[in-house]
Image (cartoon, helix red, strand yellow):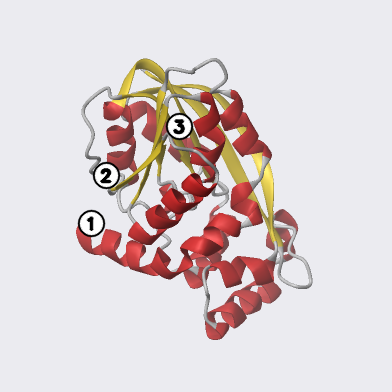
């Protein structure tokens, strides 16, 4: 099933590569700046951008390090990343197609692993985290950024429903507690967590994934029918725009 799901995810994102290069949510943010700051003074480092998507982590990392390997399951994403890197003169970015759960790299072959807004698409989160740990050198740094799920079950249920209706390749947004436990079991020591809010403009959010009109209407219906506590938590606006919780998790290979 993992192979089939990975192929499905790749097919879902194949037509959307350019949308993710131009996405404001993906190309900007304090979390991206925090990742970049971790690379200052690491001019000899080899960096893995795991699940690179539109390549924004790679573009920010490349000026500070020796090499960045942008890895993603979707070939069209990698094609766009390679083209954009060339246009920006970032000759130290290489691309490699692979699933997070089965990385084609030697043990301890990277000085830094960076992973942003991709884990919720992995068929097997912990298998991907174990692979990230395997290819990372001992005691070296990894940074994971993703949307996080609320611990309250009804809030979590609504979030996952919004996500799967918007994008059929969505697997799960994990709570901070689930993240910490999975990282520990995968061989990482967590050194810090930064929580942030990410505002999603509803028309842009559904356009980026080319969500069907029917599914967009169902999401809006769920939002409208949700109890006040849910509307308040996600700060749902009249046009459907809302807040997501995100976490930037700083780790080292234990």
Residue position for label 2: 101
Q: Residues within 10 Å of mark 1 (few under 14, many from 20)?
A: few
Quadrant in the rendering for residue 201? bottom right
Single out the mark in the foreground, 1 or 3: 1
> x%, y% of residue 50?
39, 41
User: According to the image, label 1 marks what residue?
Assistant: 2
The secondary structure type at the circle numbered 1 is: helix
Q: In this view of the protein, can residue 174 be seen by the observer? A: no
Q: Which corner quadrant holds the N terminus?
A: bottom left
The answer to whether the residues at label 1 and label 2 have Cβ atoms under 8 Å apart is yes
Lower position in the chain sequence, tag 1 or tag 3 = 1
Q: Residue at x 21, y 58 (%)?
A: 3
Identity of the residue drawn at 61% across and 82% down: 217
Label 2 crowding class (10 Å Cα cut-off): few <14, some 14-19, many 20+?
some
Residue 234 x %, y %: 69, 57
In this view, which residue lies farthest toward the right?
Answer: 238
Residue under the image location 68 percent in, 37 percent down: 30
- In whole angstroms, how far apart are the C-alphas of marks 2 and 3? 18 Å
Taking 78 as reference, is 193 left or right? right
Secondary structure at badge 3 equals helix
Which numbered disc covers residue 180? 3
């Amino acid at each position: 099933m993992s192979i089939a799901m990975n192929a499905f995810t790749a097919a879902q994102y194949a037509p959307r590569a350019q949308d993710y290069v131009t996405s404001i949510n993906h190309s900007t943010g304090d979390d991206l700046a925090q990742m970049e700051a971790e690379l200052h003074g690491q001019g000899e480092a080899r960096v893995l951008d795991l699940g690179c998507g539109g390549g924004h982590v790679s573009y920010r990392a490349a000026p500070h390090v020796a090499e960045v390997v942008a890895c993603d399951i979707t070939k069209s994403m990698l094609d766009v990343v390679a083209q954009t890197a060339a246009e920006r003169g970032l000759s130290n970015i290489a691309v490699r197609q692979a699933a997070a759960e089965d990385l084609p790299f030697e043990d301890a072959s990277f000085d830094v692993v960076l992973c942003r807004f991709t884990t919720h698409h992995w068929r097997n989160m912990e298998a991907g985290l174990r692979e990230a740990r395997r290819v990372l050198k001992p005691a070296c740094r990894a940074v994971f950024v993703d949307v996080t799920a609320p611990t309250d079950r009804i809030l979590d249920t609504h979030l996952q429903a919004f996500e799967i209706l918007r994008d059929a390749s969505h697997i799960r947004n994990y709570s901070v507690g689930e993240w910490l436990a999975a990282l520990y079991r995968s061989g990482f020591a967590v050194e810090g967590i930064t929580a942030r809010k990410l505002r999603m403009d509803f028309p842009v959010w559904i356009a980026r994934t080319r969500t069907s009109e029917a599914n967009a209407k169902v999401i809006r219906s769920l939002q409208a029918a949700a109890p006040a506590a849910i509307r308040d938590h996600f700060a749902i606006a009249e046009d459907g725009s809302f807040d997501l919780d995100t976490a930037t998790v700083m780790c080292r290979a234990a």
